Image (spheres, rainbow, N blue to C red):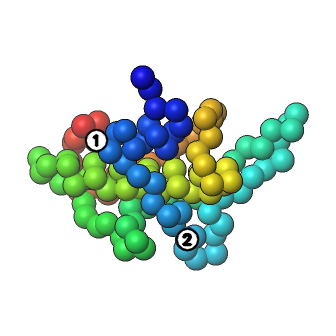
Amino acid sequence: MSASTPEDRLSAAGHTLPAPPPPRGNFAAFHLHAGPAGSQPLSLSGQTSRIDGIAVSGSCSGEASVEPARAAARVAMLNLLAALALAAGGELPERLRITRVRGFVRSTADFTSHTR
């Protein structure tokens, strides 16, 4: 039996959506564009690893454990999903066409485990 909503599936995987993070600076959390044939392409602003407004900081280096970086990436992705839910009226959409996802890893020159 599969979970019925995206939120149910997140919960089954041990995750909960945080409150949507407030935009920082002169940015909007999202922008719905008027697209062709009535579509509404959505742009989400960059989401960082922040928990309750406090940045998760650090840098990946050498052969150090990638677990802290994975945890920070998880926080950023949950923040992104929370912003998506806000743009979609409060719930994550069942279907979504994603055209681009961009992520960054802060690392030192000797870090080579980007794909782990």
- Mark 1 sits on what residue? 114
- Mark 2 sits on what residue? 22
Q: Amino acid at mark 1?
A: His
Task: Quadrant for residue 61, please give it.
Answer: bottom left
On screen, 21 above or below 82?
below
Task: Quadrant for residue 95, please give it.
Answer: top right
Of residues 111 and 94, the one nearer the viewer is 94
Mark identifier at residue 68: none
Kindly identify the residue that appears in the image at 34 percent across and 39 percent down.
13
Query: Callout 1 environment at 10 Å: few (<14), some (14 to 19), or many (20+)?
Result: few
Q: Position of residue 62 (x, y in %)?
A: 14, 50
Verify CB contact (< 8 Å) between mark 2 and mark 1. no
Q: Quadrant of the C terminus?
A: top left
Kindly identify the residue that appears in the image at 57 percent across and 40 percent down.
100
Q: Secondary structure at mark 1?
A: loop
Query: Callout 2 environment at 10 Å: few (<14), some (14 to 19), or many (20+)?
Result: few
Taking the image as shown, residue 5 lies to the left or right of residue 110, namely right
Q: Nearer the viewer, mark 2 or mark 1?
A: 2
Of residues 102 and 28, the one nearer the viewer is 28
On screen, 40 above or below 109?
above
First of labels 2, 1 by sequence position:
2
Q: Quadrant of the N terminus?
A: top left
Q: Amino acid at mark 2?
A: Pro
Kindly identify the residue that appears in the image at 86 percent across and 38 percent down.
38
Q: Position of residue 51 (x, y in %)?
A: 37, 67
Residue 99 visible in this rendered orientation of the protein: no
Q: Position of residue 106 (x, y in %)?
A: 32, 57
Of residues 92 and 42, the one nearer the viewer is 92
Q: Secondary structure at mark 2?
A: loop
**Residue at the outermost left position:** 63
Taking the image as shown, residue 111 lies to the left or right of residue 76, namely left
